[in-house]
Image: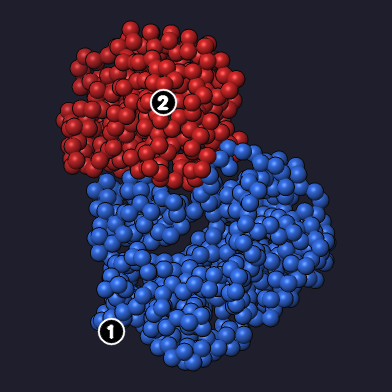
Amino acid sequence: MSGGGTGRLAVVGAGPAGLAAALAAAEAGAEVTVLDLGQRPGGQYLRQPTVDGVRPAPHPARFADLLRRVGTHPRVTVRSGHQVWSAEPADDGTGGATLRLSGPAGPSTLAAPVVVLAPGGYDRVVPFPGWDLPGVVTAGAAQALAKGQGVLVGRRVLVAGTGPFLLVVAAGLASTGAEVAGVVEAAPLRRWSRHPLAVAGAPGKLAEAARHFAALRRHRIPLWRGQAVTEVAEHGSGLRATVRRVDADWWAGELTRNVEVDAVCVGYGFTPSVDLAVALGCATRTDPADGSLVVSVDELGRSSVPGVLVAGEATGVGGADLAVEEGRLAGLAAAHRLGLLDDAGLARASTPVVRRTARQRRFAAAMHRVHRVPDGWTDWLRPETVVCRCEEVTAGRLRADVAGYGLDDIRALKLVTRVGMGLCQGRVCGRAAACLLAAASGRDQPLEDFAKRQIVMPVPLGIVAEEGPPR
Amino acid sequence: MAGSFDVVVVGAGIVGAACAYACARRGLTVVVLERAGLVAGATGSGEGNLLVSDKLPGPELELALFSNGLWRRWAAELGDRYGDIELEAKGGLVVTGVGPGADGAAGLAGLRETARAQSAAGVLVELLDPAGVREREPAITPELAGGLYYPQDMQLMPAKATAALLAAARDHGAEVRLRTEVTGMLRDDGRVVGVRTGAGPVAAGHVVNAAGAWAGKLAGLAGADTPVAPRRGFILVTEPVPPLVRHKVYSADYLANVASGDAGLQTSTVVEGTPAGTILIGATRELVDFDRRHNAEAVRRMAQGAVRLFPALAAVRAMRVYHGFRPFSPDHLPVIGTDPRIPGLVHAHGHEGAGIGLAPATAHLVAQVLTGERPDLPLEPFDPARFSSEVETAGAAA
């Protein structure tokens, strides 16, 4: 493979999975380059301040230790501020990939015989009337601002959606100084009682949840369960959120309260970042737990493309602890592929980790069943509600075009309505649009049609035009 | 025959949609069969050019001039009932001698000769000096020798135009069946009398092959050897930006590439804006069968050419890249009309990159043939059987 020396591994993403993969492979003898878009390693979960004077958010010791060990390992080089904007599989069939990068020093390419992709995920959003107003932000964005720059999205905020991440964000915002008016959780949390084994298998998660609930109590933040913010409207200089009771399918019922705030932080779980893997030709599947499109991998993170491994949320959303274990396994499997571990060595090192990940996956699946995102939100939309923010395509337009033109697949929908054709390329609206199309056309829609993109992040043409030096 | 149609149109791309519209408007009963979805082939992968500028005098230019007039008429007929097809008479600009080291004098001489010939054939064309080029395209590089301006060149949004034509055809009684693959032909004493599909047979007086890059395969089902092959092309799309490129602008070597039958990768610079604000950048041509893999080098060359032509594009972000398969015909002329070898089979394909532009004229001629009218243009140059004596050339190109 051109440019790739023996024992050379490229890791994309410096979140928990990427860091763990880098460390495991480096400890087995690999020379590892970690590429990360952020200014400092850690990803979203371990986000470190990028502005002087901002106090780092506290992380569990095991993660702080991971960051430190990667940072000081002689065989690991972390390239921060590097965006992988495209990638191609090795065309000589030897495996691995050529990654196209845009970094502080301009374009470059990195060819590696083995790559581990650990791109993480991003906030899943569902559209509702007012979701596109200034002041309505994703829970992840609110957290990133607070953690990275010590900036609050508003003085008084409401956190809404579903999933344990809401509690984390609410507690984090409160401790950064925000007044959190409440947490609106669509799931009736008693559903957790249906999954006693999954919970028992992950005692750490129980302790974590207890910590978050204690934080809510300490900050006197009410938790409204089985309810949802079904609309946000401008109100004076701020926003007013309409909170309604919702049933198990998210059909909205009675109004429970109107909440006046400066900002509404919404989160409905996460969308795995699979586009880089899809660009490399990795097979995907629909995660039965939450319906997300994920990369198909074996238990060690090996994808269908030789020399391309995937770890963390891109293989199924499961949180940082699971991501670390998956990263470790992918790092070991990468070292094995590089010839640094033999079969017995790989088995010895990976077996106990595989056992732990199985338990954590059971917990993740239970979490997805409790905090599922059923289709009832589609009924919250008004004809004028924007579905695709980049191209300003409304729900009414989308439904009318599907009916009027007989559109029945994502490609035709994109071309005719322009939904998902803007700067986000469907990352934000793709799943919602696919859901609306499926309902309007009566045909299931494969999510992969929104994930196929050779340019995985918008990149200046001047960068595309240059080959860039090999790294 | 019960449940029989006058016409089965195979393919729901721009040509199939245009054929359905033209036939249904004449009162023929029409069904469109499409193995995938709407605009699944080249129609959904192109820029939507309606060009006269890239054609030299001959039957294709006549078809293009006729077709551009039809597009204007059709746009008026469709009105706003079926949505905006974004027809824009933006004009085309061909430039030469771009960048340092280019032979501007030779390029200009070539352009002058092209303009003279095209002008004699009825094309409106204006020779521009560098200042004239920059007056029309203020953001273009000052390093060029000159260009030609073509006010008749237009653009439209192919997917919307196709969807609108099919919707209009439906209002004239046509049926559209998506995800219905044609698996064979119904024959009666040598004549094609319909098609077999995954969902059962469909009987028809005529079968119109509008299968684009797959037309050769479909014709093969009828035993009509037709050497139409896929010619792959990539397009880069930028983020939406305020108006920066006003016309379709391309370098003169595009003409040579279009006219070439070379199988290897050819790139020439084609840049244009769209009503959505995005800028489309082309163009590459490769005869690589239906190879769906990415070609990073092709994309890099397109970006390089675009930045050379419009330096401000260096800072504009590329958002998307995609490819499609043009229906390549070995002699660069489309295949239109009844197949003299197989009664009942009618061809409407082989337009390579000009299918959007040539669709109305093609459909108009097909409808005239099907209704027994005298065609408005001679069909001999597009004769489906013309390759029969050239089987070797065709085989090599495919």
Kindly identify which chain the residue marked by label 2 belongs to: B
| Whether residue B398 is situated above or below residue A324 in the rendered picture | above
Residue A282 in sight here: no
Residue tagged by mark 1? Answer: A256
Image point (80%, 61%), residue name:
A75
Residue B196 position in % (x across, y down): 36, 37
Question: Which of the chains is blue?
Answer: A
Q: Of the residues shown, which amino acid type is indicated by label 2?
A: Arg
| Whether residue B202 is situated above or below residue A357 in the rendered picture | above
Distance from Cα at disc 1 to Cα at disc 2 = 63 Å
Q: Are callouts 1 and 2 both on one chain?
A: no
In this view of the protein, which residue sits in the foreground, A98 or B347? A98
Q: Which mark is residue B298?
A: none
Residue A218 in sight here: yes
Quarter-wise, where is residue A242 in the image? bottom left
Q: Is residue B23 left or right of residue A48?
A: left
| Whether residue A451 is situated above or below residue A362 in the rendered picture | above
Residue A165 position in % (x across, y down): 50, 77
Quarter-wise, where is residue B86 in the image? top left
Q: Find numbered disc 1 in the image and state the secondary structure of the residue it sits on.
A: strand
Residue B280 position in % (x across, y down): 43, 37
Give the crowd class for mark 1: few <14, some 14-19, many >=20 residues within 10 Å. Answer: few
Residue tagged by mark 2? Answer: B134
In this view of the protein, which residue sits in the foreground, A251 or B72? B72
In this view of the protein, which residue sits in the foreground, B315 or A302? B315
Q: Find numbered disc 2 in the image and state the secondary structure of the residue it sits on.
A: helix
Colour in which chain B is shown?
A: red
Kindly identify which chain the residue marked by label 1 belongs to: A
Q: Of the residues shown, which amino acid type is indicated by label 1?
A: Thr
Image point (40%, 30%), residue name:
B138
Residue B361 position in % (x across, y down): 28, 23
Image point (51%, 80%), residue name:
A176
